[in-house]
Image (cartoon, rainbow, N blue to C red):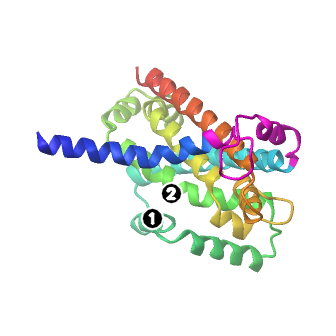
Amino acid sequence: MNKRRTSLVIFIITILFFYIPLLCLIVYSFNDGRAMTWKGFSLKWYKELFVYSDKIWVSLRYSMIIAVVSGILSTTIGTLGAIALKWHEFKWKKALNVISYIPLIIPEIILGVSLLTMFATINFKLGLVSIFIAHTTFNIPYVLFLIISRLDEFDYSIVEAAYDLGASEMQTLFKIIIPAILPGIISGFLIAVTLSFDDFVTTFFVSGPGSSTLPLRIFSMVRLGINPAINSLSVLLIGISIILTLSTKKLQKHFIS
């Protein structure tokens, strides 16, 4: 009984430690004052966010476009790569499997420097395209191993039965394999979008003039002092994240059922 109480207390403390900063962020987004002292309820920072913060919205649009497009590409490559590594035999399969882990274990700053070095070597202009390439690069391994873990639970005899009934590889892929692992594909896509949207370190190295994503924009604003409009923006992003999470759970339940 004491162990249960101890576990419950630790769990509650952990949850409070995680959510209290978010609660403070939400409260101070409605603060009339600029400093972290309550001056009264006000919506002026939301007004400033929507009316005067054009650069923030441009950066948000860049982040969303890059996150979605790189998420789609990395999910496609990661899914096909996972199927190949799981069920097909080819030369250098073991080496490729090991190499795929490298982006997951090396520090992100090293990945950013290496990508910057590569772009500089081939004289590739830094901008939105270089950010897109970088985000797709570090997203693929996350999707890859998530799909592989999903394929571990997949009954391959269903695929063999499809081949015996005359289905081609493409028909088997699109009508049997993908529908069966679709919840994992959706999860991989959402992880890729989240990692891309949230990334700062790698983006910092491979971004060029006029291609600041939202994390870079917020960082440049914070260096000059905390702007309460950032709190308002954060509250809106939290709300969007909650809506997307709930929608994704409903979609996954629908496909599983």
User: Within 10 Å of the Cα at label 1, are there few (<14), some (14-19), or many (20+) other Cα atoms?
Assistant: some
- Residue 134 at x, y percent in the picture: 66, 62
Figure quadrant of the N terminus: top left
Residue 76 appears in the picture as rendered: no
- At 70% from the left edge and 42% from the top edge, which residue is drawn? 39
User: Within 10 Å of the Cα at label 2, are there few (<14), some (14-19), or many (20+) other Cα atoms?
Assistant: many
- Residue 95 at x, y percent in the picture: 42, 69
Figure quadrant of the C terminus: top left
- Chain part drawn in magenta: 27-54
Quick check: 93 left or right of 74? left
Quick check: 131 left or right of 256? right
- Earlier sequence position, callout 1 versus callout 2: 1
Q: Is residue 76 magenta?
A: no
Q: What is the distance, in whole Å, between disc 1 and disc 2 at their CAs?
A: 7 Å
Query: Contact, CB < 8 Å: mark 1 with mark 2?
Result: yes
Q: Return the residue at label 1.
A: 101
> What amino acid is at disc 2?
Pro
- At 51% from the left edge and 44% from the top edge, which residue is drawn? 188
Numbered mark located on residue 141 in the image: 2
Q: Image height check: is 240 above or below 93?
A: above
The kind of secondary structure the magenta stretch mainly shows is: loop
